[in-house]
Each structure stands twice: as structure tokens, then as C-alpha cells.
Amino acid sequence: MLSQLRDASDSHRSLTIVVAMAITTILMYVLPGLPPLSVVQGSNIWYDSFANAGVFVLLAMGLNVVIGMAGLLDLGYAAFFAIGAYAYAYSNSPFSHTDLPFIPMLFVGAAVAGIFGILLGAPTLRLRGDYLAIMTLGFGEIVPIVFLNLDRFTQGTNGIGGIYRPEPLPVLGAFSPSTPFNYFIVMVVIVTVTMILLYRLQDSRIGRAWNAIREDELAAAANGINTVTTKLLAFSLGATTSGLAGVFNASKLTIVSPDQFLFTVSFTVLAMVILGGMGNIWGVAVGAFVVYNIQVVFLKSINGIIETLGIPAFDLGPVHVNLAKVPFSDYQYLLYGVALVLMMLLRPEGLFPNQRRRQELHIAEEFDEGEQGEITGAMGAAPGAAGDAGGTL
Amino acid sequence: MTSLASPAAPARPIARGLRFVGIAIAAIVLYTVALWLALPPVSGLTSAQAFPVAIQQTVNALSIGAIYALIALGYTMVYGIIELINFAHGDVFMIGAFVSVIFIGGIMGQTGPVENIPLLIVLIGGALLFTMPIIGFLNVSIERLVYRPLRNAPRLAPLITAIGVSFILQNVALVVAGSGDRSAPQVFPLGWHVTLGGASISVLSIFIFVLALTLMIGLQVFISRTRLGRAMRATAQDREAASLMGVDQNQTIALTFLLGGMLAAAAGLIWGLRFGFVRQDLGFNSGLKAFTSAVLGGIGNITGAAIGGFVIGFIENFASALGFSRWSEFLVFMVLTFVLIFKPSGLFGHATGDRA
């Protein structure tokens, strides 16, 4: 029964995604109103945080194209998020005296970010991957600084505020802070469409080209893949998705400022992709959702939970520990750092691995072990001899 | 130029050294003149007023460049040996700055300038002897614990790990020391000056430059003259062949991290003396600039990284002297971009295609 379901979902993936998202939406509509959840908080808060988490789900799915599918390390992902957000701010704010429609601006903002992706990627992608990492790291650092310093055009630290909300939806009415359901629905649609497109892209010729480049760039080039344009496509597609998320985020927060786009955002999204499982679209989406909730909900409420449970302060040797007073949410990046390192060491394929990626990440070890065994077998005492020589250096 | 991967020590080292010193002095003089000419139109100073300012700024540039150069050496050596951009290196420098503050402020209990010269020597020498082994060992442990298991993993894995380590170090510092600036005791009296060409130059800047130069020359001698240095060069050139010739790979790589960490620690001490504060996010920016220096000099090239550090120091100083310090990071990034576009092998590197 379960395997039949899996086969069906594999062969009708787009339909599966739509159905899954529809079920999620209905659950989100129904569940928060029912007793156990409705006691915790009102349903509007559920929609609101779901929409916010959706922004990170989008970001993670976009970064997954770059890291998971094409195998490029993008450390300045927040820069494109910022560019998308500022693009929307310029098209819909009292600061710029414009009020352009929301839906077309989603595409425009995404396209602007994508163009910046091409501009940054084109010179760098000819070089080997490490340089892309450092270039994007630099770019991610520079973009907020530029937005900060060009205060004539961006209002510096204050950012651009009072961004207009999207136009009213046909049935649901106007967007406002008190109707987060609208944002929720828009987000669900965006995530669904993006996910379908990404899955289709992954199974297409381009997706296979990305796989080939990631596994062996030289072999891919020898088989007629134009590695530079294919990598550039992945990179700018990631940037485009980031820009899309930026537009949505700006329209929801109604303010953009440089401090929303610091390196920590890029790092958080990276952690989401790694934890979710590089290359696995739904895994990354779930990873993003989980990490976002750990960050925003769990770490913030942990002190409250400890207080409610009544865990008393205790002395651990000379150290006085009062768990209720420990600022757990300050430790989130330490936590991500540890998680990233441990994942890379112990389970590089992530929590929800993509089958192909998993084999790829482990094949090196298997091959290596085999090879080493052969060498020691053939050379007998050789390692000891090498050690002696090293000692006399 | 001594590249880590160059086959042998250069012939006629003294003649080459002298020529090198000549070029360096010419470059420094050229910078002073350029700044002197650029200052009047921007700042409104007269030509005569601008001259001492230009000299002062040149000395400033040399001392900040020394910090970048020392950090850049760690990047370039690690990249030369195992082809890894060690993102955590900037944060190792930051930890070094904290540890030197712990020694001077915490253990020795100093808070302000120390006019007593023997005590000052003991303080700074002690701080170096205390900080350098600790940070060197920290760097070696990082390599041993997280980079070595990933040595044969796909390229992305160690890079991501390095970013993770960078965040761990940064946030450990955040948890221990809190956010915001922590003051570092400036034991070297800032009041000491010598006068040169109408400009009063702080002795600290000269001291920093000399200290950094001594360490760099020491490194250069170590790499080009000792057996372990030769092992490092051999490993950088061809790891497998070196290993077959009896060079212990693990030992050599650990040594590289040890040296890189020690230099970063010295840079950390210098930072504290020079700027009087340390902060947990110090390593990120300085690391990026130092990496740019290493790329500018041709990554894997020791001399190149040192020169690159000073060049970045000059560029940054030029911007801030003319009143554009807000844009210095932008400028450095532009340098990185243009180097990567037009000369990815750097100023002194060998053209090696995509495996630059």
C-alpha cells in the first residue's frame, strides 16, 4: 500500500505536490481552531508564522539548486534576498512615490536578483568552486554595506519603510496585519509553484547536467555540457528564487533595512539546506521549516518551558546553573555551527538524503578504504618505513 | 618569489633580497607621494600641510597592512598545502586577539600604557610566547578534529565545515565575552613619537611593522632553509609524491596549521595593541580582507600573501585618508573581483588554469 503510494507520487509528482500542499492548507485552516492548538495561540498567529517560515522554505529551495544540485557554494545568498526586497521597496513605497502591482513585481524582483546573480557569477564561475564561495561571501558582505552607505537612495540604517501592501485578493479581501491568511495563501501558492518547477527542472536535461557537473566537472565537459553556462544557470536561478522571497518578505514586513540581510541569514539558509539534505527538494523544504521553527519558536520559548516545568536552579560543581535564565536564543548560531560541522563529519547527505547524493558523498570513502587496504597489503612494512623517514625530517 | 610550491630556494638570496627591499621602499615612497598629491583637492589641506599627514598615513597603512599580511599567510599556506579556503582562519585570529588580552589584562593585570621599557618587553614578549602556542595548537586541533577526516571528501564538505567552525569560534567568543567591544589594554604607550619630515610617527606603528617583518622573515627562512620547510614545499607541490618520498603528510599539514595559527595569534596581539578593542566579529571582516590579500598575491605564494596584505592595507588606508572609510570594504571587494576576473593567479602566482 505504502509502496504503491510512493510509486504513484513518483510518477505524478506535480499532482502530489499540489495535493500535499492543499492538505497542508486545509489542516492549517482547521487545526488551529481545534482545542489543543487553539489554546496555545490564535489561528492568525499560525498563518503568520507559516508565511514567515515559507520565506525561508523558498530561500532554502533556491539555495539547494546552487549547492545541492549544481554543487556550488554560495555564501552570499542573503544579498539576492536583499536585492529582491529593495526592488519591491522601490516599486511600492512612499519613498519612491510609486505603487506598482504586487504579482508582476514578484517576477520583476526575482528577475532583478537573477540578473545580479549572472553579473556576479559570470566572471567567477570560470574559476574553480572555492573562488565562488569567497566571492559570494564578499558580495553578501558588501550588498548590505552599499545599501547602508548610499543613504541618499536607501535611507541608510533606517531603511525604506511604509511599503504598500499587495492589492486585495478577489475573495479574501485586503492584505493587512490582521489578515495573515492572505499572506499564508499567497505563500502556499508560491511554494507549490516553485516546488513543482524545481522538481521538473531537476528531472530535465538541465537537472541531469547539474548532477554531472557536481559529480565530475571534467567528465561533464567532455560529454558536451557547457559547464560555465550550466553553472551560471543554477547560480542565477538560486538568486532568482532568493529575490522572489525578498519581494514577498518586503511586502509582508512593509520595511526593508540593511540589517535584515546580514551574513547570518545566508548562514541560516545554508544550515537549513545541509540539515535538510543537499539535493533533496522536499527534504530541504522540511529542513527549512523545522530550523525556522527551532529558531523562532523553540529557542525563544525554552526558558518559559523550563519555568513551567519548574526545573530549579542547581550547582554543577562551582558553576551555578539556572536554566530558566540561560539566553538560549543567543546560542542559535553556535548551534548551527556545531550542527553543520557534525553533519559534514557524520552524515553529509543530510537528514532527508537524496539517494544519488548520498551515494556520491560516501563513494569516496568506500573507494578510499579499498585503495588503502590494497596499498598496505601490497607494501607490507612500507607505512612504518615512511613514518621513520618522516621522523628524521 | 617564494611560492610554497616552488621547487627550491631562490638562487643568490641576498641580491634578490636587496632588490626586493629596493622595490618595497620605492612602493612605499610612491604611496606617500600619491597620497600627498591626492589629499589637497579632497581635504582642503595645503600642499605643505598634507605632507606630514601623508607620511603618518603611510605608516598607519603599513601597520594595518602588517596585520592583514600575517593573517593572509595562514590562508595562503593552508590553501597551498591542502587547497582549502580555511574560512575559520579569520576567527582564529580573533581568538588570538582575545587570548592576548587575557594574558596582558587578565594574567599580568595591566590596564594602561607601560612606560617602563624592560617591563614592556616582558609583557609583549610574554604575550607572544603565551598566545602563539595556544592559538597554533587551537588551529592544529581544528585541523585534526574536523578537516582531517574530510581530507578525501567531496570539495564542498570541508568548505562547509570551515564555515561551520568559523561560526562556532565566533559564537563561543560571543557567549564568553558578550557582544560589543571589549577593551584591550594598550600597554605600548601611544604617546611615544618620533618626528620625521615634520610628521610625528608613533613608535607603536614602527614596532608593529618591525615585529611583523621579523615574523615573516622567520617564516620565509623556516620554509626555505629547514627540512620541515622543505617537507612543506614538497607537500604543496605534489602531496602524493612527497608522501612516497617519506614526507609525513599529517605532520606536515599539522605544521602548516601550527605556523598559520601562530602568525594569526601575533596579528591578534598587534590588533589589540593598535586599536585597543577586541570583538567577537572581528575575524569575519579581517579574514575577508586577508583572504583578498592572499588572492591578490597569488594564493599559495608566501611572499605574495605578505605583499598582498600590505597592498590591501594601502588601499584601505588610501580610502580612509581621503574620507571614504565607509567604502573601504567595498573597495577591497572590488579589488578581489577584478583580480579574479583579470588575473586569477594573482600578482605573483603561476597561471595554472582552473586549478589556480
Image: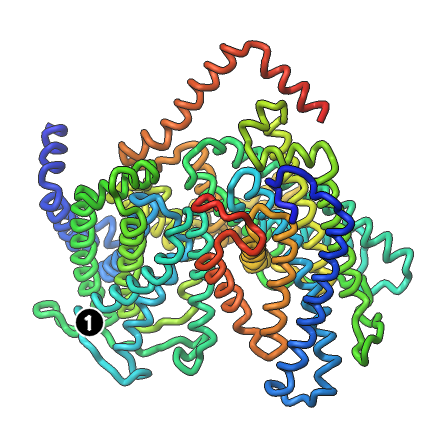
- Quadrant position of residue A249: bottom left
Q: Judge from the rendering whether residue A79 lies leftward or rightward of residue A175; answer left or right.
A: right
Residue B34 x %, y %: 65, 76
Q: Chain of mark 1?
A: A
Residue A307 versus residue B111 in the image, above or below:
above
Residue B354 versus residue A33 in the image, above or below:
above
Front-lying residue, A244 or B226: B226
Q: Which residue is mark 1?
A: A102
Q: Judge from the rendering whether residue A192 lies leftward or rightward of residue B20; answer left or right.
A: left
Q: Is residue B71 visible?
A: no
Q: Residues within 10 Å of mark 1 (few under 14, many from 20)?
A: many
Q: Is residue B319 visible?
A: yes
Q: Residue at x 29, y 57 (%)?
A: A236
Q: Residue at x 54, y 57 (%)?
A: B292
Q: Disc 1 on helix, strand or loop?
A: helix
Q: Kindly identify the amino acid type of the residue bearing the numbered disc 1.
A: Phe
Residue B106 x %, y %: 76, 53
Q: Residue at x 82, y 50 (%)?
A: B125
Front-lying residue, A238 or B321: B321
Residue A62 x %, y %: 29, 53
Q: Residue at x 82, y 75 (%)?
A: B196
Residue A259 versus residue B78 in the image, above or below:
below
Front-lying residue, A20 or B119: B119
Image color mode: rainbow
Residue A25 x %, y %: 16, 53
Q: Judge from the rendering whether residue A110 lies leftward or rightward of residue B346; answer left or right.
A: left
- Quadrant position of residue A123: bottom left
